[in-house]
Amino acid sequence: MISAELKATILAAINLDDWEIDDDTVASQVPGWDSLTHVNVIAAVEERFGVLFGIPDVVALRKIGDLQRLLDSKLQHKGK
Amino acid sequence: MIFTDLKFIACLVPSVILFYCIPLQWRRYYLLLLSYLFYLTWSVPYSLLLFVLTLLVYLLAVAVDGASSARSRRFAAIAATGVLIAVLTAFKALSLPTFLTTSLVVPLGISYYTFKLISYALDVYWGKIRAERDFAALALYAAFFPQIPAGPIQRAPDFLEQLKTRLALGLNAPLFDTGIGFILLGLLEKLVIADRIAPFIAQVDASLELQSRLTILLSTYCYTLQIFADLSALTLIALGIGMLFGIQGPPNFNRPFAAVDIQEFWRRWHMSLTGWLGDYLFLPLRMAFRKWGKWGLSISIVLNMAIIGVWHGLTSQYLAFGLIHGAYMVSSSLTSNWRNRFFKSQKGRGFYRRVWGTVVTFHLVSFAFVFFRASSASSAIQILRGIALPGSAAVGGIPFGAEVVRSALAASCIALILGYGVFSRNLEDFLTQTHSRNLYLAYGVALFAIVLLGVVDGGQFIYARF
């Protein structure tokens, strides 16, 4: 389940007013989310949630559900 | 031995028949033997280089996988990628006549197999896959003969998975059937289209100063279409041969001339190379520069496109080709929000945007290919001057009625249609989705056209020299 906060951060990073996003959505299904804007989304999520992603983390992402799980694990790790 | 050579086809047919006669568990070793035999016909010492590099990457990937500390993992991964990049760069540099008195020949397919091995080493390092323990499987991945001359650059997880699954199932009749179609269409694109355009380009280049502005301009468009037909043909034949042995490679083109902007063009053109660079070069660069905002994006794009350029060869004209595309991409990405807002406010202009965008993109691409085509930077400037400046009367230039011009224009029109899309589909989809009876009719027409119109001694594929 994609949190409302993550969804809002993604949409703001790609200048999109609204779009249906769920766990299985892939970047290419979202208008304006391509290889050039992909890292803008990653940087926006890092800034909004105060986390840092490594290159292997980002390379392994296949769908938006993966980004949510990665973010959750980073936040959990940060909270410890 | 090139794919259009009759000797190659004469060897391929019995090789395929024998492949299906031997037990399933021996087929990967048989394919490995065929791949090395193919390479040995070209060069014995360079076959040894391919083997040594594969063995080195195999051992280092196993070391990455089994390393007890992050430091030793990183060391092994850097050693593998470092050696491959150093070998590739050294051969590209030593092949230039300026470095040695006699320039060294670049090993066949080195740009492709080093990229395959780099992505494999990085995939293991990033934890996407485990290191392959079967050396024969990795050696076949690197040396798989249909993909050796010019790709497409298949990723290790996809190839290794197919070795375990598809190859173990025996004959895949639909895949085999499609493979024949891909080979026929590839031969058609090469022998009837690309090699019919090539003599016109060669004649213009040989006597540039005698040609009219219009002839030079026409040759510029024709070259873009020739290079599409040539590389697309090579890809189709490589994919088709792979399918005959049960291996499906990645697509390389998806209607590139239907692109409405330069970003879209690069998502449709030479996709296995651009996808590779996107994942293993652009993404790490972009991550490293992500705090630099638009500057970071621009630097990553320019570096990425410059490397696409010099990947073809360490010359000023290939660098210029890459930098021109870098400038296009930076301008396009920095203005995309503004353009999207503008066209969103102009209801009903979508059609005009598509038409205008397609025409402009084709012209931008053709302009950059002038540097790709030219033998030197000064020769590229000469072509551009020939188009831009009014020259003297073209005495001795190629007349428009000449057969070489008519053939090139007819072939270019077909290449444009194929590159724009057959009924809005790319060639691969057209072949895989068409009803089998219509498909056999298309095979017949293709074969007829190859026999009737094909150029017999058209020469090597352009991309086989990289």
Image (spheres, coloured by chain):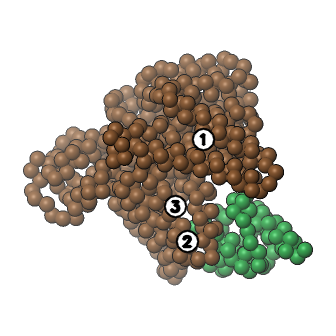
Chain colours: A green, B brown
Q: Earlier in the sequence, mark 2 or mark 3?
A: 2
| Above or below: residue B30 compared with residue B208 | above
Between circles 1 and 2, the one closer to the viewer is 2
| Above or below: residue B339 compared with residue B318 | below
Q: Nearer the viewer, residue B94 or A1?
A: B94
Quarter occupied by the C terminus of chain B: top left
Left or right placement of residue B65 versus residue B382 in this view: right
Residue depicted at x 18% and y 65%: B389
Residue neighbourhood size for the residue with mark 2, other residues' Cα within 10 Å, grouped as few (<14), some (14–19), many (≥20): many
Q: State the image coordinates of residue B308 (x, y, percent, origin top left).
A: 48, 55
Q: Earlier in the sequence, mark 3 or mark 1?
A: 1
Between circles 3 and 1, the one closer to the viewer is 3
Label 3 – label 1 distance at C-alpha: 24 Å
Question: Label 2: which residue?
Answer: B297
Left or right placement of residue B183 versus residue A35 in this view: left
Q: State the image coordinates of residue B213 (x, y, percent, origin top left).
A: 19, 58
Question: Label 1: which residue?
Answer: B249
Please check whether the numbered discs 2 and 3 fall on a single chain.
Answer: yes
Residue at mark 2: chain? B
Question: Label 3: which residue?
Answer: B304
Residue depicted at x 44% and y 55%: B309
**Would you say the residues marked 2 and 3 are in contact, meaning their CB atoms lie under 8 Å apart?**
no
Q: Earlier in the sequence, mark 1 or mark 2?
A: 1
Q: State the image coordinates of residue B411 (x, y, percent, origin top left).
A: 33, 43
Residue at mark 3: chain? B
Query: Residue type at mark 2?
Result: Leu
Query: Residue type at mark 1?
Result: Gly
